[in-house]
Every structure is written in structure tokens, then in C-alpha cells.
Amino acid sequence: MPFAIVSSNNLKGTSMAIPKFKEMERAYGFEEVAIVPGDITVNPDQTNTELIIGNLKFPIPILASAMDAIVDPDFAIAMHKLGGLAVLNLDGVQARYEKPEEIIAKIAQAPDGEVTALLQKAYSEPIKDNLIGDRIQKVKKAGAVCAVSLIPATTKRLAPVAREAGADILVVQSTVTTARHISKSYRGLIFSELCDQLKMPVVVGNCVTYSAALELMRTGIDGLLVGIGPGAACTTREVLGVGVPQVTATMDCAAARDAYFKETGKYVSIITDGGIRTGSDLCKAFASGADAVMLGSILAQAKEAPGKGYNWGMSHPHPALPRGTRVKVGARTTLEQLLFGPTSVTGGTENFVGALKTCMGVCGALTVKDMHKARMVIAPSIKTEGKYFQAIQGLV
């Protein structure tokens, strides 16, 4: 069969529209943007960083992630005393073992090649209702607010147990959370029913898009976790390829929050979860529209954290498709110093509250909501511009 050869000359002067399979938009992470200072400044001591979730108020807008290497009852109590909120993982070792510190020590000491299998075995131990009650009661007896986390698969059974034990806030957390779920095998978790049943603040996550965020808010939730895969101990982006950089994800979900507030008068707190390494990242999260941030591996460095310098992803123990890794972060300082300083560290990895208050002051923001109005610019050179000597010394 003869072939037709078309010369490029034959195409001159023609205009051919090439159809696109799909459109892609540019998304931005913390390292690609910068905050523009305000036209007026405010004394940092006069700034108000208060966070409200449901009917509960917290002096600082920082949550400790529901990871076994970070939050146990003692850590939750310590976090409360400092003004923040720690979330206790009821799908983790605290609810599976009488002495969870023993299994945590084994996980921390295991060789790299054996740790995933050890985690999978450790997390196959059944969850015990009495341990849920014990852990929550320890936090409550110390006068602290108790927030607990469950995955959707265990929420229907264990949420009433947690509520009966005295939990104050329920966080329902999975890799990706939507208001609608399709399954042939079971009736999915209905958040509107859950909120009506529990009569307590419910925070759900994780989410990264405007439409999913708005649908979730319409179910009656009080807070939304934003972020898929940016955590230091998470490998979701490597395993599944899904996620949206945190600045764009936070801005889109914050837009949904504002639309929902105009629609109903109810304000749902946006909590940026993951990807924060330094004070600058934290400040950019608030300028992007966050009402709070959730920190993981940063707080795993606190001497009070049960992991003793290690952290691992919440989906790392998954029996079929682990999405996480164990990271060594080192137990290098106290929780108070991480949050409030004083610090002699120059890279922005301590005194996160101080960084936020100072940034708010520079932007002329008296409140976190004022901080939402700070102008931002796309600035991929923000960390390297003029930093020649830092670069050659390996500090950038």
C-alpha cells in the first residue's frame, strides 16, 4: 500500500487547532511564594492568634498531628498547657496496647528494612474500647481539651465510645476525604448524620479542592484539614501521585470556607496539615487563608514526644499498600521551645508562635483573619536571592 508523504511546505499558511486532552493549572507550594509586608505595622505583642473550633477556643492556632510518635496523653496535656491542641490517634498503639511505649520503642529501634513489616504487625492488634476510655480520661482528668482521631472505617463504632469517655473534638481523617463515597460493599460514613449524632465539634480531612471542601462544609463539620501528601513522613504523592501544593490547596479551601460563611453564617476553620518545615512556611499558610496549622515531624522533635526522635506516617502500617515512612528527626529540644522559644537556631525551626506574631506585625495584621488579607506574590527566588554566602556554606 503506498504511503502519502506530506511536505511541511504543504502546511505553510494553514492554521490547525490541536485539541487538548485536559487543561492544567499552575499550583504553588510554600517555597514559590512570598508575603508582601503591609503599609502599616503592629507590635507583635498586640496580635491575637486565637483559634476557634466549634465552641472551643485555643490561644495558639497550632495542632499536633494524630501520629503515634507525637501524641500520647502526656503530650496532649503538655500541648494544652501551652495553648494548642494535640490530637490523639485512636486507631494507633494507644488504643491497642496497655503499654504502648514498649511497641513504640521497638519501632524506633528496628532496622530500616524491617520497620514496615513490624508496623503492619503491630497495628494488626485489635483496638480495645477500654483503652480508648483510659487514654481520654487521663487527658480530661488533667483539665485538658481532648481531641481524638479516627479513620472513616472505624468511626461509626468508635466515635460513640470516645464521646462517652469524654472526648471534646472528633477528627475523622483519611488520605482523601469527600462528602460522597461510592461503594458496593457498605454504606459509607455520612458526615451529616455523624455531626447530628455526636453533638460535638467534628473536624474532617484531608481535602485540597474548593468543590470537595464546600460539600464537606455543608454536612455540618466545624473544621477541615487541608493537605494530601506533603508531610515529611508521608509517601502518598510518591505512591499514588495525588496531591496539590499547600499554598494553592489552602487558598482554594479557604475560598470554600468564605463562600460557605456567606451562604450560612457558619465559619468552618481551615487547618493546613503538612508540608511546614520553618516559620516562613507556617506564616505563608496563614497568609494563604489558614485559620490553624497541624504540625507533625516538627513536634516529633520535642523531648516530650513518645517517638523519642522518630516519626512515621499514619498510613505506613497499611496492610496492603503502605503510604509512609519512618523518619529520624531527633529529640533535640522541648515542646515549649519549639513553640515559643527562646531560640538560638537561625533557620526558623523553633519559636513558631513568635514567627507568626512577628509576621503578623510586619503585615499589620491584628488577628489571623487580618492575616488572610496579606498580599502574596509568586517568588521562586525568595529563599536564594542574595544568599550567596549561605549557599556556598550549604545553609540554603
Image (tube, rainbow, N blue to C red):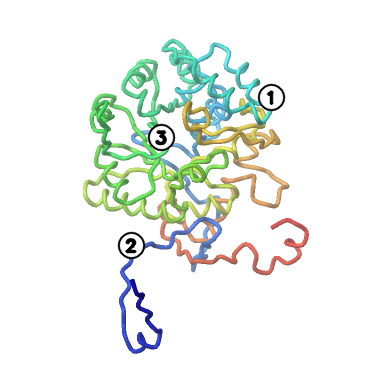
Dot 2 corresponds to which residue?
21
Amino acid at circle 3: Ser
Can the viewer see residue 279 in this picture?
A: yes
Side of 373 where 179 appears, left or right:
left
Frontmost residue, 44 versus 101: 101
Marks 3 and 1: in contact by CB < 8 Å?
no
User: Circle 2 — which element?
Assistant: loop
How many C-alpha atoms fall within 10 Å of the one at disc 2: few (<14), some, or many (≥20)? few
Whether 386 is drawn above or below 165: the answer is below
Amino acid at circle 2: Phe
Name which of mark 1 and mark 3 comes first in the sequence.
1
In this figure, what is the number of numbered marks? 3
How many C-alpha atoms fall within 10 Å of the one at disc 3: few (<14), some, or many (≥20)? many
Whether 152 is drawn above or below 49: the answer is above
In the rendered image, the quadrant that contains the N terminus is: bottom left
Side of 177 where 107 appears, left or right:
right
- Residue found at x 53% / y 34%: 313
Give me the disc on residue 174.
3
Frontmost residue, 320 versus 358: 320
- Residue found at x 74% / y 61%: 390
How many C-alpha atoms fall within 10 Å of the one at disc 1: few (<14), some, or many (≥20)? few
Distance in Å between CA atoms under marks 2 and 1? 49 Å
Name which of mark 2 and mark 3 comes first in the sequence.
2
- Residue found at x 24% / y 33%: 192
In the rendered image, the quadrant that contains the C terminus is: bottom right
Q: Position of residue 387 (x, y in %)?
A: 70, 65
Dot 1 corresponds to which residue?
109
Q: Mark 2 or mark 3, which is nearer to you?
A: 2
